[in-house]
Image (cartoon, grey):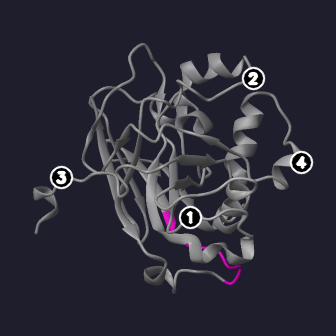
Amino acid sequence: MEERSVHFHSPVPDPPSFRDFYAFEQHVKAARKLRGLEMNPLWYDIPIFYFSNHIVLYGHGNEVRYPQGSKELDFELEFAAVIATGGSDISAEDADQFIAGYTILNDWSARDFQREEMQLNLGPAKGKDFGSSFGPYLVTPDELEDAWDDNGKLNLRMTCHVNDKLISDGNTDDLYHSFPTMIERASRNSSVQAGDYLGSGTVGTGCILELRPENAGGWIQRGDVVRMEVERLGVLENKVV
């Protein structure tokens, strides 16, 4: 069957939850610098996350609605793990067996909404609430056995094009906090469920905010096509309408 004849949903169309982490050091440093902040040493100890909207999800090829009232729409180039089976208080040493697979994630962000909300020391909320894209596939860990480097990290190139122009170029091996440590954090005094999404956070260079709009061709506009590719995980493409 040809891909163009298939309507893609998010690989897990109805996940119990979606936690998005903040685990790429380069992006965190750059984002904090833009706000006039030094790197917080606590970040290195805690794989921090927030709960995002697990209801409004887009798949590969779906049209993404531009958030009403925003003038600063951004993409975020990420990848995500999907939980295979539920558990509580999982150790990082045991967490690999809880990973069903990996997929590409575009964590769409309305920066003007986000900027307002975070002045109140809470959020992101409506700045991220209007939808996220996942896909195109769920790639199981056995398909990636030869993709790990000597440091025990997945070594996969990550790129993002907007209207065929290369904007972002990073690699999964820049991830500071591993998915097992994320699972340990997420399940502590709580639980993860089969089908949960855990996002990596934005890779370095993986959003317009970090690069600055004047260097990246401006914010995303209606009609723009955002194409993300992660080596071995496929291509996730959406048109904004």
Q: How many marks can you see? A: 4
Query: Residue, x 72% and y 31% (percent of image)?
Result: 34
Furthest residue in direction right, as rendered: 41
With 211 as the anchor, is 74 left or right in this view?
A: left
**Within 10 Å of the Cα at label 4, are there few (<14), some (14-19), or many (20+) other Cα atoms?**
few
Helix, strand or loop at mark 1: loop
Query: Residue, x 72% and y 44% (percent of image)?
Result: 28
Tell us which disc is closer to us: 4 or 1.
1
Q: Which residue is mark 3?
A: 7
User: As shown in the figure, which amino acid type bears the numbered disc 2?
Assistant: Asn
Q: Which residue is mark 4?
A: 41
User: As shown in the figure, which amino acid type bears the numbered disc 3?
Assistant: His
Give the residues drawn in magenta, as a range.
150-157
Query: Residue, x 49% and y 42% (percent of image)?
Result: 107
Q: Quadrant of residue 66?
A: top left
Q: Quadrant of residue 52?
A: top right
Residue 20 drawn in magenta:
no
Disc number placed over residue 3 in the picture, else none? none
Helix, strand or loop at mark 2: loop
Q: Which residue is mark 2?
A: 121
- Residue 117 to residue 210: above or below: above
